[in-house]
Amino acid sequence: MRAGFDCPSCAIGVRKMISRLKFVDRKRFNKGVELDTTVQLVTVSILNGESPDLDALFEAIEEAGYDPVRMYELEVVRLKIRELGQS
């Protein structure tokens, strides 16, 4: 998710607000949130079996003082296996 922060200090509030959300896996990254100020990207680890609440996520970023711009979602692709030589 693009959030528009410029420095590591700016990102602290974003991490603090996002890590409070109930679907965030706080055991991964730094309290469930990885921040890259170079490309202004926030990566959020989601608890296994949970779905992210996008409205709550956007609100957390806004409460930290930033405007969410774009969200990228990594989808797990199912691998389909076919045996060769069989119809």
Image (cartoon, helix red, strand yellow):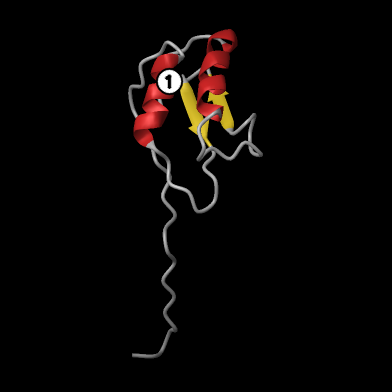
Say which element carries label 1.
Answer: helix
The residue that label 1 is drawn on is: 61
Q: Is residue 71 visible?
A: no
Q: Looking at this rendering, what residue extends furthest in the bottom direction?
A: 86
Give the percent coordinates (x, y) of residue 8: 59, 12
User: Residue sitting at 43 percent across and 20 percent down?
Assistant: 61
Give the percent coordinates (x, y) of residue 46: 52, 42
User: Residue sitting at 39 percent across and 17 percent down?
Assistant: 62
Q: Is residue 48 toward the left or the right of residue 62 in the image?
A: right
User: Residue sitting at 39 percent across and 90 percent down?
Assistant: 86
Q: Amino acid at mark 1?
A: Ile
Q: In which quadrant of the rendered view does residue 60 lie?
A: top left
Q: Is residue 46 above or below residue 83?
A: above
Number of other residues with Cα within 10 Å of mark 1, as a class: few under 14, some 14 to 19, many 20 or more: many
User: Residue sitting at 63 percent across and 34 percent down?
Assistant: 29
Q: Is residue 81 toward the left or the right of residue 12 in the image?
A: left
Q: Is residue 38 toward the left or the right of residue 51 in the image?
A: right
Classify the position of the C terminus by image quarter.
Answer: bottom left
Give the percent coordinates (x, y) of residue 69: 33, 22
Q: In which quadrant of the rendered view does residue 27 lie?
A: top right
Q: Nearer the viewer, residue 81 or 72?
A: 72
Q: Is residue 8 above or below residue 47?
A: above
Give the percent coordinates (x, y) of residue 30: 64, 29
Classify the position of the N terminus by image quarter.
Answer: top left
* Count of residue discs: 1
Q: Nearer the viewer, residue 13 or 39?
A: 13
Q: Is residue 59 toward the left or the right of residue 20 in the image?
A: left
Q: Is residue 39 visible?
A: yes
